[in-house]
Image (cartoon, rainbow, N blue to C red):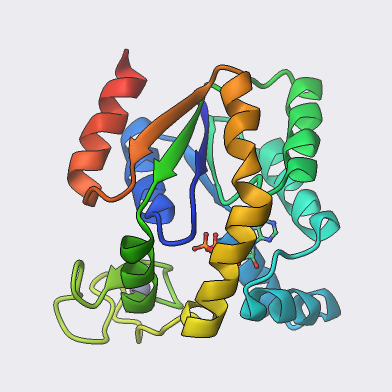
Amino acid sequence: MNLIFLGPPGAGKGTQAKVVCKHFNLEHISTGDLLRSVVKSNSLIGEKTREFMNKGLLVPDEIVVEIVAQEIKKNSKGFILDGFPRNLAQSEFLESALSSADIFLNKVFNFITSPEKVVDRLSGRRVCPKCRAIYHIKNMPPLEEGICDKCAGILAQRDDDKEEAIKERLRVYKQLSEPLISYYQEKGILCDVDGDLNVEPLFGIIKEILEI
Ligand code: ADP
Ligand code: ZN
């Protein structure tokens, strides 16, 4: 099974992808996470990547596409693409990469999310830099404030979860990523889900759709 999770920043794609991947034994391919590792690598390309990300802009296609191609090649059990594709050029790249590897997309879940929810989720989000667990100061707080439940890492706010970058990410989503909704609708594999729902009820719905 190969899926795409599409939706604005703050739609809860990453959190939901972790749950769905665990249940169905899929690989979670998060371009955001992969790019954050590139940034940490302290290379020239990492430095360039950091600049785009911190401003809330898309990282250039040639960097992202290369990373995704590698992940798809490595994968043997099916995947969720979380955060990719994010513009039409990326979706066209994906289409040719998948078809030349004889891989098919089963579904694209479109997380429909209200603007208020998005801002609330992003501004309250905290992440563990060590194990990448995701928390929210109100909706999903850790047992001990500021400390990761899973690995005791010190939780942090992402640089691009600050107000200015959030605005830019939402603008970029509207302009570049939203057109993908009709792209996948025309292919007949788009499935709208309510991104405002909490993790558990939304998982129930996605699970039911995938088990049909
Ligand atoms: P969110 O979806 O909440 O914005 P992500 O962690 O998915 O968070 O992405 C964070 C940032 O990483 C984006 O704002 C962008 O700079 C970069 N990024 C992630 N995926 C892509 C992609 N497919 N193409 C270009 N840039 C990307
Ligand atoms: Zn952790």
**Height in image: 76 above or below 74?**
above
**Height in image: 44 above or below 11?**
below
Quadrant observed for ligand 1 in the rendered image: bottom right
Whether residue 140 is visible to the viewer of this picture, yes or no, is: yes
Identify the residue at horizontal 23%, vertical 48% (top origin): 197
Q: Is residue 161 left or right of residue 126?
A: right
Residue 173 spot, x, y in % from top left: 59, 57
Q: Residue furthest left?
A: 143
Residue 24 spot, x, y in % from top left: 36, 31
Dividing the image into 4 quarters, which one contains the C terminus? top left
Camera-nearest residue between 37 and 96:
96
Residue 72 spot, x, y in % from top left: 68, 38
Rendered image quadrant of residue 45: bottom right
**Height in image: 73 above or below 210?**
below
Q: Residue furthest top?
A: 212
Camera-nearest residue between 33 and 131:
33
Rendered image quadrant of residue 179: top right
Identify the residue at horizontal 32%, vertical 45% (top origin): 19
Identify the residue at horizontal 74%, vertical 53% (top origin): 67
Whether residue 31 is visible to the viewer of this picture, yes or no, is: no
Count of marks, rendered view: 0
Q: Is residue 110 left or right of residue 70?
A: left
Identify the residue at horizontal 56%, vertical 79% (top origin): 165
Residue 101 spot, x, y in % from top left: 76, 24
